[in-house]
Amino acid sequence: MNNQTYLKIQDVRAYGLRGRTPEGGWSNELKPEDCVHTIIAVLTEDGIGWGSVFTSEALVKASLEILRPLLLGENALEPERVSEKLHQHTFWLGRGGAITHTISGVDIGLWDLLGKACGQPVGRLLGGRYRERIRPYASLLMREPERMAAELLPVKAQGFRAFKIGWGPFGRKSHAMDEAIVRAAREAVGEDSLLMVDAGGSDAYWPGDYKWALRTADMLADHDVYWFEEPLHPDALEDYAALRRAASVPIAGGEVLTRRQSFAPWLTAGAFDIVQPDVTKCGGLSEQRRIAQMAIDNGVRFIPHGWNTTVGLASDLQIASAFAGTDLVEYLTGSPFIDDLRAGGWRLDADGMLAIPDGPGLGIDLNLDALAAFSQSDVAGLR
């Protein structure tokens, strides 16, 4: 792209990913044909900006019917202003749901376009690059104790040195089962690796209460767990704040929250040690940056949630480069929507680190053949 002051948005398109959707560990388990991630393409006369939404294609396309008239003809080089315009003019449709999620993907696409127009990686535009590489943590489902080594050892052999295990049977059977799972995981990854535990408290009908979470946190401390994620129902603000004060391990959460206004009471109440906004849901990079700064101002670490796509991972890498204390990103292992959707794929270095792309925009090119296959769509107009 050439440097310019105005880049007209011509169209916005959605491409739902399906056919190889990975397990989520949810009580209502995902099937391969389910669509929970949708790629956004923001089209201009001078190129495409890519975004990602943690929402089904049907909801994204319906949302775009509302958003498109507000977007067409707008300046793609002003992501924060344009995204705020979308928020301001759609409040009556419900803040925080499918509309907000879809705005997230549009916003990511606009930042990608701005970076390409400037010839700079997005992280530099967000404030500067504190690092050129970062440690990814492998995100895997929990299994029964006897199956954990088989899940973790192949991923460790790929070079990962940090691991998060979550959902599945944890918190739903017995304390003894929970401890056996964590013990097996620690034995598999070794003493030198980071190990995090995600209870999955946003799952349907989550049974864990404050006393369960406090007892479990003590057990996790015995196994040197780095943080305890989503241990409680996602609306239990007071219990989260109490748990964070009493627990012997750091408490993480926030992936279900959207926009900075929703995060504010949690951060001011001291409910988290680590806050995890998801860029594909919370409002995009524009909102995520505000949330991250608010977290820092309240003494909370910012580590983005990243159970999404290769575009979501690229976004996380860019924003992680722009915050000094954000030294980890989530990597959903075994997902073709991450591994295959980026042209050339992703590779860890010898230290188990992931390079932060330094090309313009998000710094990645999409594998359009993979996008066509996963979305079952004609992408000829994107080439």
Image (cartoon, helix red, strand yellow):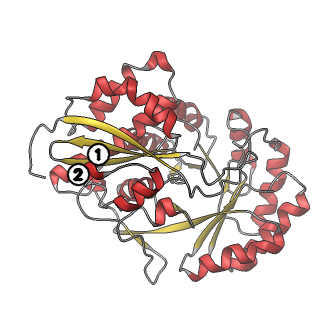
Q: Residue at x 70, y 46 (%)?
A: 245
Question: In the displayed structure, does residue 124 sit left or right of residue 54?
Answer: left
Q: Residue at x 71, y 69 (%)?
A: 224
Report the quarter where the C terminus lies. Answer: bottom left
**Of residues 62 and 271, which is closer to you in this image?**
62
Q: CA distance from mark 2 to mark 1?
A: 6 Å
Question: In the displayed structure, does residue 127 sit left or right of residue 164?
Answer: left
Question: In the displayed structure, does residue 30 sit left or right of residue 205?
Answer: left
In the image, residue 14 sits, relative to residue 249, either above or below, namely: above
In contact (CB < 8 Å): disc 2 and disc 1 = yes
The image quadrant that residue 234 belongs to is: top right
Residue 192 in sight: no
Q: Position of residue 204 (x, y in %)?
A: 75, 39
Q: Secondary structure at mark 2?
A: helix
Q: Position of residue 174 (x, y in %)?
A: 90, 56
Q: Amino acid at mark 1?
A: Trp
Q: Which mark is residue 310?
A: none
The image quadrant that residue 10 belongs to is: top left
Q: Amino acid at mark 2?
A: Gly
Outermost residue toward the top?
92
**Of residues 188 and 343, which is closer to you in this image?**
343
Q: Position of residue 101 (x, y in %)?
A: 47, 36
Q: Which mark is residue 111?
A: 1
Dot 2 alpha-carbon crowd within 10 angstroms: few under 14, some 14 to 19, many 20 or more: many
Dot 1 alpha-carbon crowd within 10 angstroms: few under 14, some 14 to 19, many 20 or more: many
Q: Secondary structure at mark 1?
A: helix
Q: Which mark is residue 115?
A: 2
In the image, residue 49 sits, relative to residue 179, either above or below, namely: above
**Of residues 370 and 75, which is closer to you in this image?**
370
Q: Position of residue 20 (x, y in %)?
A: 56, 58
